Image (cartoon, rainbow, N blue to C red):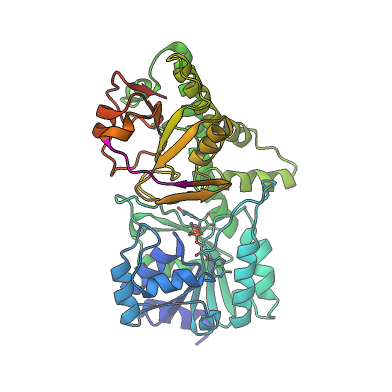
Amino acid sequence: MDTYALLKNKIQNKKANIGIIGLGYVGLPLAIAFSKKGYLVYGVDTNSKHIERLNKGERYIVDIDPQEALSLIRKKRFVPTIDASVLGICDCIIICVPTPLRRVKMPDVSYVLAAAKTIKKYLQNQLIILESTSYPATTREVVLPVLRGTGQRLEKDFFLCFSSERVNPADKKFPLTKIPKVVGGFSEKSTELACILYSRIINKVFPVSSPEVAETAKLLENTFRLVNIALANEFALVCNKLGISVWEVIEAAKTKPFGFMPFYPGPGLGGHCIPIDPLYLSWKAKKLGFKTKMIDLASYINHFMPKYVIERLEKLLGSRDVRLKGAKILILGVAYKKDVKDLRESPAIEIIETLQSKGANVSFHDPFLPYLKIDGIDLKRIEFSKKNLKTFDCVIVVTDHSNIDYNFIKNNARLIFDTRNVYKRGGENIIRL
Ligand SMILES: NC(=O)c1ccc[n+]([C@@H]2O[C@H](COP(=O)([O-])OP(=O)(O)OC[C@H]3O[C@@H](n4cnc5c(N)ncnc54)[C@H](O)[C@@H]3O)[C@@H](O)[C@H]2O)c1
């Protein structure tokens, strides 16, 4: 049997060992999904704390049940480890490492490169899949040359694909297994092997003609959101000038049964995907002599939102004869989005930094984060009470976590600036974005 037939047979019969590199928001749920389907999964992570926490049955990301993970570990169906040599006994290896931006807004594919170099040491008759979001041609230009460096032949001795992860952490409606997977390999054989593998855990798999198509499709998805959120933010600014509620405008527009999809304004964009992925595309486009004006403009508008929140707050306080300098402000929610504890790129950070630099006295509450120690900020979460809520000049809702008693806050706070529309009906002490 040749490598292709052997791999196909092993994947189909659940005899393939699966190696996942990077056990974060993307890699860990994937590892558990394959393990639950009966595959033996090796999870390799350079962060030994993640491995220790998994082995203790502790949670470090939202979308997994740590006890379920522990039970798979005990049954020896899931092996989390820092020892990358286990990749030598894996048939399929999936790369789920971070792809952040460097300070100068350039893609940082160093983690992908490091993962490829690790695989290179153990490459033999395997299917390799890159899931990390990156610029078009990363699989071809970053991963492939490293693997070829072994002297092994693509499509004969190893197979290579790109298939982006599309998970939305904390989204109960669309868990990983219900989100169709786009797969683009270097040939039909690579694509087919990856499609068979993913179809074991995912309802719908959509093959495309190349890794570049799959890579670019992911960037279109995230750019679509970036641009539409920017549009909603711009409408928020215009509606404020018009003296009307942007939230009501969106609710009204939403009644159109075709040709409209609601997006909502907010205090700024956060997370690892929407503010960053489109910049991977603009960087690549620039290298090809093309300027992505839409992405640049949308990023500009979204980046302005934390500043806008401060501007509105200063005016609000001013109208009550309170100066921002010395004002007591409570930030409600600091994670970048609802119901997660992820702080990456969170607009709350810029808002807190600016408030502190302007002399405000800032406190925060976030049910997911007991303290905030980042970028010069060093704050301990406060627990709010009837008594202390009254002492704040303003409470700003920055993240709309579900497990917060918003009615209690409404009934006890002097002034609330709601940037997320949690108070849909408004109120005397409530000002919405
Ligand atoms: N988080 C999301 O919602 C999401 C959604 C879709 C796609 N993505 C993309 O998926 C990729 C991974 O994102 P994430 O959110 O899971 O990141 P993450 O930071 O949560 O996890 C990445 C993990 O990789 C580990 N790691 C880094 N380098 C390693 C190496 N060389 N070998 C082994 N382990 C290594 C880290 O220790 C970490 O545990 C990124 O490209 C991201 O853009 C993320």
Q: Nearer the viewer, residue 283 or 257?
A: 283
Quarter of the image for residue 204 reads bottom left
Is 380 within the magenta?
Answer: yes
- Which x, y percent locates residue 395? 38, 30
Identify which residue is drawn at 67% across, 48% down: 103
Judged left or right of residue 251, residue 281 is right
Relative to 118, residue 316 above or below: above
- Which x, y percent locates residue 18? 45, 76
Q: Nearer the viewer, residue 73 or 124?
A: 73
Judged left or right of residue 127, residue 282 is right
Residue interval drawn in magenta: 379-385
Residue 35 visible at all: yes
Identify which residue is drawn at 50% across, 85% down: 89
Q: Nearer the viewer, residue 50 or 96?
A: 50
Assign the C terminus to one quadrant of the image: top left
Residue 265 visible at all: no
Q: Please identify the residue farthest to the bottom as the structure is shown.
A: 1
Identify which residue is drawn at 45% across, 17% down: 240
- Which x, y percent locates residue 322? 46, 19
